[in-house]
């Protein structure tokens, strides 16, 4: 038996407890390049214990609906940012933590132009471009150690529709 | 009077002296998400003195040809990665350094799917999406200090065509 999971549009306000939404909003922090480029400065809380920040690429297969959420994972040693390179919307599943167990599972769908940064240790689903494959630049922790915990749900969630 | 600047396709091999080309090439470093996602691991040399890595967004106006290169700049305190969010090709102008003066100016044009990371202190031109505006995620140094030197050419360069 599975539990239905509703999907909301991603926004900075509702995602704040889990991470940052990296997007162009309002006026730039400053203009550079003789006024021809706006810089929106320092939009993500990068947070690593030991180790260091690095840039990797993730090349993810397309996911389709209905999408089964049978597992979430977390990275206790560092934050993880996902920057989509081809504008494909992606499903972001997160959960609160209750003494090592993910609870209050929630799902969001990104809009074009939105990247996200998951805060350190936040429970989240697999990378999930919807309807098309997705390449993502990922800024996360480079260092030793497994830095991965998984939790498999006895009663999985399912995303039937978006929106 | 200006000097003509030829443009070559961006590739990791010819750009190695100036920075990294961040792109999917060959097999992934490892498979994650139950085999549905390939991770290409740690593709850029992030290099900051004091300060720390951060993610910003740059929203750049379109540039057109002919493009005048009358100035280059460098950031002595940190590397700077440019990750295009909408696949627009961008012109990358770099130069060697000879005792504080940029010499051997070169120009490259990126292909879709290519991001770049300029190594710390490398002379480079302004952000230059060609033919369309470009949004870029930028991973660079967050910290105090100007971290910027500019050099204005007495005899500018011009990019007439992209071959």
Image (tube, coloured by chain):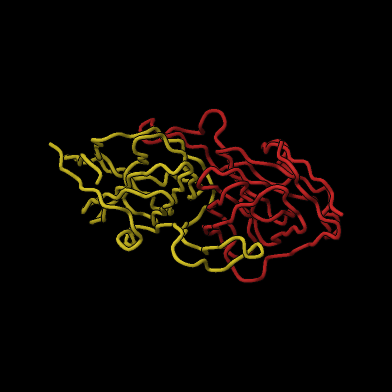
Chain colours: A yellow, B red
Q: Is residue A22 left or right of residue A33?
A: left
The residue sitting at the left extreme is A1
Residue at 26% from the left image edge and 56% from the top image edge: A96
Name the foreground residue: B37 vs A6: A6
Query: Where residue A138 sits: x, y (%)?
Result: 48, 46
Quarter of the image that includes the C terminus of chain B: top right
Query: Where residue A90 sits: x, y (%)?
Result: 36, 44
Residue at 54% from the left image edge and 49% from the top image edge: A54
Residue at 61% from the left image edge and 49% from the top image edge: B129
Query: Where residue A39 sits: x, y (%)?
Result: 55, 63
Q: Quadrant of residue A36?
A: bottom right
Quarter of the image that includes the N terminus of chain B: bottom right
Question: Taking B48 as reference, is A63 above or below it?
Answer: above
Q: Quadrant of residue A23?
A: bottom left
Name the foreground residue: A143 vs B27: B27
Query: Where residue A125 sits: x, y (%)?
Result: 31, 44
């Amino acid at each position: 038996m599975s539990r239905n999971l509703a999907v909301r549009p991603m926004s900075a306000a509702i995602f704040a407890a889990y991470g940052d939404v990296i997007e162009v909003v309002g006026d730039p922090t400053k203009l550079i390049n003789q006024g021809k480029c706006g810089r929106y400065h320092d939009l993500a809380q990068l947070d690593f214990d030991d180790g260091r920040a690095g840039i990797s690429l993730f090349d993810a297969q397309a996911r389709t609906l209905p999408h089964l959420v049978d597992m979430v994972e977390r990275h206790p040693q560092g934050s993880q940012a996902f920057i989509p390179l081809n504008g494909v919307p992606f499903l972001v599943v997160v959960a609160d933590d209750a003494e090592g167990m993910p609870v209050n599972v929630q799902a969001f769908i990104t809009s074009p132009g939105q990247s996200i940064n998951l805060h350190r240790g936040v429970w989240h689903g697999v990378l999930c471009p919807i309807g098309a494959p997705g390449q993502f630049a990922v800024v996360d922790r480079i260092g030793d150690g497994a830095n991965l915990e998984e939790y498999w749900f006895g009663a999985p969630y399912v995303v039937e529709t978006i929106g």
